[in-house]
Amino acid sequence: MAYEVSNKTTGRETMTRMVGTACDWLRACGAGCLGAGAVIASTGGATAAPAACDATPETARHHHLPANDGTVHWGWLSKSLEPELTVHPGDLVTVETLTHHANDDASRMVQGDPGAESVYAWTADKKNVDRRGAGPMDASVFGRGAGEGFGVHILTGPIYVCGAEPGDVLEVRILDVRPRPSGNPEHAGKSFGSNAAAWWGYHYNDMIEEPKPREVITIYEIDATGALDWAKAVYNFRWVPQTDPSGVVHETIDYPGVPVDHGLVEENHGVLEGVRVPIRPHFGVIAVAPAEAEIVDSVPPSSFGGNIDDWRIGKGATMYYPIGVEGALLSLGDPHAAQGDSELAGTAIEMSLTGIIQVQVHDREDLPGTALEDLAYPLLETEDAWVVHGFSFANYLEELGATAQQDIYEQSSIDKAMRDAFRKMRHFLMTAKDLSEDEAISLMSVGVDFGITQVVDGNWGVQGTLEKSLFPADTD
Amino acid sequence: MAYEVSNKTTGRETMTRMVGTACDWLRACGAGCLGAGAVIASTGGATAAPAACDATPETARHHHLPANDGTVHWGWLSKSLEPELTVHPGDLVTVETLTHHANDDASRMVQGDPGAESVYAWTADKKNVDRRGAGPMDASVFGRGAGEGFGVHILTGPIYVCGAEPGDVLEVRILDVRPRPSGNPEHAGKSFGSNAAAWWGYHYNDMIEEPKPREVITIYEIDATGALDWAKAVYNFRWVPQTDPSGVVHETIDYPGVPVDHGLVEENHGVLEGVRVPIRPHFGVIAVAPAEAEIVDSVPPSSFGGNIDDWRIGKGATMYYPIGVEGALLSLGDPHAAQGDSELAGTAIEMSLTGIIQVQVHDREDLPGTALEDLAYPLLETEDAWVVHGFSFANYLEELGATAQQDIYEQSSIDKAMRDAFRKMRHFLMTAKDLSEDEAISLMSVGVDFGITQVVDGNWGVQGTLEKSLFPADTD
């Protein structure tokens, strides 16, 4: 299935190379390029349940969804994507996910890994995964490349969940998460990740050392066997302009998957010497397909989940998502080895991971009276806590209208995300825990912790954490 | 020693009873009423070291500083306050602190407790602690009462620390924190606290149930022996107008220590049934005297510490403060049994506590090369972590000038506090941990957690937490 954005801009003369959002494109393109009501010519679509849904198996199955150039979509979500896998509620899926930063050090994170090699394959003649982002295929905005990098994450899927209908809730249990070992024999037994302190980071225009501003990549090493629970830095380098195989020069980190020429950068070894970063393997992105728009930038999280970037979404966690479209169309990606609350510099330790998940569907008719009643937001349950995720805009595609996918990058604040997190936690306490508003508000003030999930994903996030121990009767 | 604000406003006709800040007063009063450069007629002052500093004792002493009407100041800080106790570095102090919410239920939190009774004593003829807040003594702004409630916390002290000089760092170790038992025989073995969901809360103009808006007090019970590590709600009530002993009617919670007439409110028992709130006993306020102004509202935290409201500042914690004035002039108060990050509704479980602290002075000449080098902000060390406290304005008295103490209530945001917390954590990593800026920024993105301390104290707060385990060489 191929997409064509029907309103193309013409001419490269307007393609000012800028670091930022796609405002110019939008202005040239008019409302409707992206956002709610986007005009997309789709040549196909998942309009009917796959045949695999016809018969319900007697026992749950365990599927394997590899990550390769045939199973991933890069930088965008869409309700019209063909499913890569169809599962029944209760099924398990081993799902491979690849970091979109692997080409920061291809020898450690791509080479010798057939899946990663197929996804990253890019020569002057052939680019296996052409679209990277929700922008125009002809790169008519900034000329960065197909999709313009308006969205950056390599996402595996989507997975069609039989019986999932709009209004239902999809449960995704994360049973296991493991590092993807380097495929390079030189690095056997190790995994690697990349942290980019990039132009979209919170720090970027507030630096003290020269040269300013600058982008810095730090490569981290993680024990692939799981024996060590910490990561260490291997080296860092400052980004210098990189010419991609198609001949486009990337002055900054503005397009995902650009291979870094290590002949051009200066590797500084011995950085962060002796520092052990506790690993918190998790998926930055788990998304159901948004109903509000046809093709959606993978960066801003929203009511459909997506790029929440909460390190708590790891092994043992369960996520609940309001389903927007038939089959839910679940995608996973943006794997992280470790991240701090705020993701200050723009990224985590971005490292490929393989997870085992189990999916369940909660029918909308069964929700009243449960913790999932009126669930309009992604909800996390861990062994110890319930966590709501507030965003600057709870459903930015709906709230910001036709220009949502540009405007979101200019209208976010932590204050707004805190407001949303407060409302969501109040909703949870009043529905799931049956408290009055007065009870809920007092409890939030004395026993719920609000933290800053991220300030770098367009739609900024604040999470509210409610420890289950506050309700001993529920956990006895 | 008595204070008189020299610029008094005249007439009550301008005293619109408003919920909010003291803008009207400021406009009438002109720049200089409060804030940096405030004009205060002081009849005395701690200008010379107390005689107790003359001889350095051979061994540390353990002092006891009770809380009573002679040892507390209510709602304000000042560099000109006479010390209530003089100590040498290394000395221990058992310091009693009283919650300013005890009169929400006097039978449980005041009655039978001589210290609390002396502080709260207030009849038509006599009010033992008259000034409550940094406003004018004649209540010429809003007519709430002496000090106008521009600052609310009952603060014990100040404590003069011999040898402490501006530019030095004061270390305050919190060796123990214990609940203050109810003095009422009916409640033997129990302690009580009050949570006020009040007009300055983050939720106040964003409620869903009627009547709106409303203020709600929830009384919590805590085991005074320390055997139970959780609090439970006893009852709640909605605030209704209360007439104080001086005859002033308080439509809202606008002046601290107003006795609540329980014949006027409806107690709802059975609220939050079965809920156990984990207790986190800590001091909301630990402050050294600000150098920037003469008399300072106790609500907004700043570079001098003050009302940081971080629940991590409890037993086992060590705080470091840049010293502004000779002797440091340390005050403690605003004791909390429990609080969530954000203190959403405006208060914690406000409960009287007694602590044991030990003070040390780090001479400014000894700071270079240590974790305290160039320390311009309050820094927390726990057993496991270093925590920086960012505020919307790092030093609001200095940054906002003459009208700082009014303006701070209208200019805060979490975004600004996050910016400040980022800068402070970067500073700490680059000085205490000797990292380059690039190393510090990468580490903050992958291994430091930023959370929302409070959004209710005028100068909003974000804390950044760095686990010590990241630096194993320092902890081996």
Image: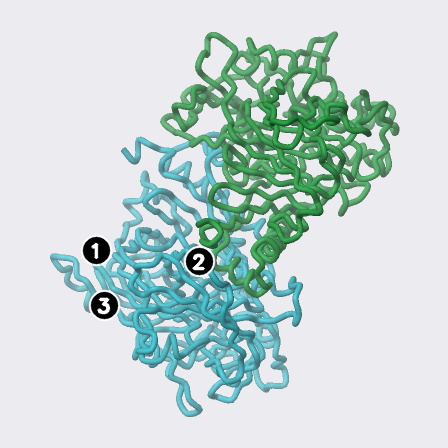
Chain colours: A cyan, B green
Which residue type does callout 1 highlight? Answer: Gly
Which residue type does callout 2 highlight? Answer: Val
Mark closer to the observer (1, 2): 2
Chain ID at mark 3: A
- Whole-number angstrom distance, CA of label 1 to CA of label 2: 35 Å
Residue drawn at (79%, 36%) of the image: B293
Q: Which residue is mark 3?
A: A64
Residue drawn at (45%, 30%) of the image: B279
Whether residue A236 sits left or right of residue A335 in the image: it is: right
Which residue type does callout 3 highlight? Answer: His
Q: Secondary structure at mark 3?
A: strand
Q: Which residue is mark 1?
A: A90
Location of residue A352 in the rendering, given as x and y in whole percent from the top left corner: 36, 68
Mark closer to the observer (1, 3): 3
Whether residue A32 sits left or right of residue B131 in the image: it is: left
Using the image, tell me which numbered label, if any, was put on residue A277: 2
Mark closer to the observer (2, 3): 2
